[in-house]
Image: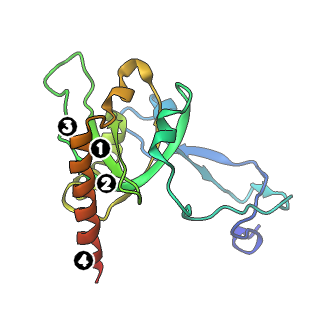
């Protein structure tokens, strides 16, 4: 069946007889597949039903989520955070064998609000080249799927100090003006 003639952008389909494969297969084969990201394999045996309805999803949201809403989420729930990467810390925790490596990423939305997010080891490895580019370029737009964990003290990483908050907002405004100058 020719899926290129059947499938249309923005419509929803029910697929049957599809295969799932991990995007990255490590040296040990499929032993760690539960931790991998998967993609769908369509074969000549695959079937698709006609779409019951259309999906109306914007490719880019009109406005980014308020970062205060991220901290208001229930614990262990996931939320999407979108913003411009303004700072990427060095990888930490490599010296201690009891810890897994991590790094901090500061994202800024269009209201010049900043949020600090901890990026864990698996996402550091999967997107290492993007994080390296984000440290040097100020035009990287990141979309992260973040889990709120109050036991780890993510709430304490808010920039509460007013002087610090003003400095970060001034830095963010300078960053945005530099981005506009680079585009022009």
Which of pointers 1 and 2 lies earlier in the amino acid sequence?
2
Badge 2 marks a residue whose secondary structure is strand
Crowd class of label 2 (few under 14; some 14 to 19; many from 20; radius 10 Å): many
Mark 1 or 3: in front is 1
- Image point 22% across, 56% down: which residue? 171
Tag 4–tag 1 contact (CB < 8 Å) = no
Vertical placement of 84 versus 1: above or below? above
Vertical placement of 87 versus 58: above or below? above
Tag 1–tag 2 contact (CB < 8 Å) = yes
Which of pointers 2 and 3 lies earlier in the amino acid sequence?
2
Which of pointers 4 and 3 lies earlier in the amino acid sequence?
3
Badge 4 marks a residue whose secondary structure is helix
Mark 4 or 3: in front is 4
Which numbered tag is attached to residue 105?
1
Q: Which residue is mark 4?
A: 182
Q: Which residue is mark 2?
A: 85
């Amino acid at each position: 069946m020719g899926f290129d003639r059947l499938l249309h952008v923005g419509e929803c389909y029910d697929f049957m007889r599809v295969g799932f494969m991990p995007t990255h297969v490590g040296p040990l084969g499929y032993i760690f597949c539960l931790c991998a990201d998967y993609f769908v394999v369509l074969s000549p045996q695959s079937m698709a039903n006609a779409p019951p309805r259309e999906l109306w999803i914007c490719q880019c949201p009109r406005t980014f989520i308020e970062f205060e809403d991220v901290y208001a989420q229930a614990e262990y729930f996931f939320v999407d955070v979108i913003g411009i990467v303004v700072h990427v810390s060095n990888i930490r925790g490599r010296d201690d064998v009891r810890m897994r490596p991590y790094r901090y990423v500061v994202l800024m939305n269009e209201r010049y609000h900043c949020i600090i997010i901890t990026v864990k080891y698996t996402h550091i490895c999967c997107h290492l080249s993007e994080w390296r580019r984000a440290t040097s370029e100020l035009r990287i737009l990141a979309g992260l799927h973040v889990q709120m964990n109050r036991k780890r003290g993510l709430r304490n990483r808010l920039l509460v100090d007013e002087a610090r908050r003003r400095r970060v907002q001034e830095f963010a405004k300078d960053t945005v003006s530099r981005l506009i100058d680079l585009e022009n």
